Image: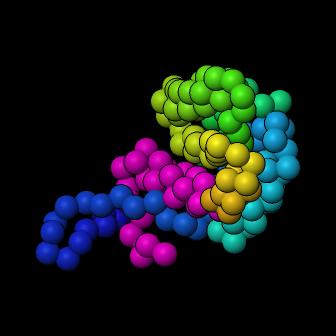
Amino acid sequence: MKTTRVGSGHTEFIGQTDGHELKIGLVVSRFNQYVTSRMLSTALETLSKLQVPETNITVVHVPGAFELPSAARKLAGMSDIDSVICLGAIIRGETAHFEHISYAASIGIERAAADTGKPVIFGVLTAYNAQQAVERIAQSGDYALAAVEMGNLTRQLLTGEPDNTEYN
């Protein structure tokens, strides 16, 4: 069934927020765990609100943000995973390490999505200090929402059939 706007005639694909059929993978960095563990809790709570069954969620823990892309690529490569969320917290220190890890994580996560054709959500906080990271933990709910929307949208695009339900 095609979704069209009244008077437009064009087809629109819109990712829905009902996750009851989706399988979501999360890759979580253990480095800065005082932040990432709370990010994971927030993301899981949001996925529950979006009706993603607990049995459809796979969580993989990796040492740090640098390792997120490798695990994300493997999860996204699994046939039964619809979307992957990468969660990490990179906090600026005294050296340029912050820039190198931030760059490697962002490029690697993007490549995991491009190489697998699956949504891989960049949920990596890059902060100048710990307080900024803690203040941004709530954004993890947005990452979960993006994973569900993009998982549904990708399914629609693969079938060529948009979902005709109202966007919620």
Residue in the image at 47% along x and 48% along y: 154
Residue 5 drawn above or below residue 151: below
Looking at this view, name the residue that lies furthest to the front: 94
Residue in the image at 54% along x and 51% along y: 151
Q: Name the side, left or right, on which 167 lies relative to 40.
A: left
In front here: 152 or 106? 106
Residue 96 drawn above or below residue 144: above
Q: Position of residue 38 (x, y in %)?
A: 80, 56
Q: Position of residue 75 (x, y in %)?
A: 69, 34
In front here: 50 or 106? 106
Q: Name the side, left or right, on which 36 lies relative to 18.
A: right
The quadrant holding residue 162 is bottom left
Residue in the image at 23% along x and 72% along y: 5
Q: Position of residue 120 (x, y in %)?
A: 57, 40
Highlighted magenta segment, given as a residue range:
141-168
Residue 68 appears in the picture as rendered: no
In front here: 71 or 136? 136
Q: Position of residue 55 (x, y in %)?
A: 81, 56
Q: Name the side, left or right, on which 137 lies relative to 1.
A: right
The quadrant holding residue 139 is bottom right
Residue 3 drawn above or below residue 155: below
Q: Is residue 162 magenta?
A: yes
Residue 34 appears in the picture as rendered: yes
Residue 141 drawn above or below residue 154: below
- Magenta stretch secondary structure, dominant: helix
The quadrant holding residue 93 is top right
Q: Coloring scheme of the render? A: rainbow
The mark tally for this picture is: 0
In front here: 113 or 54? 113
Q: Is residue 80 magenta?
A: no
Residue in the image at 64% along x and 23% along y: 96
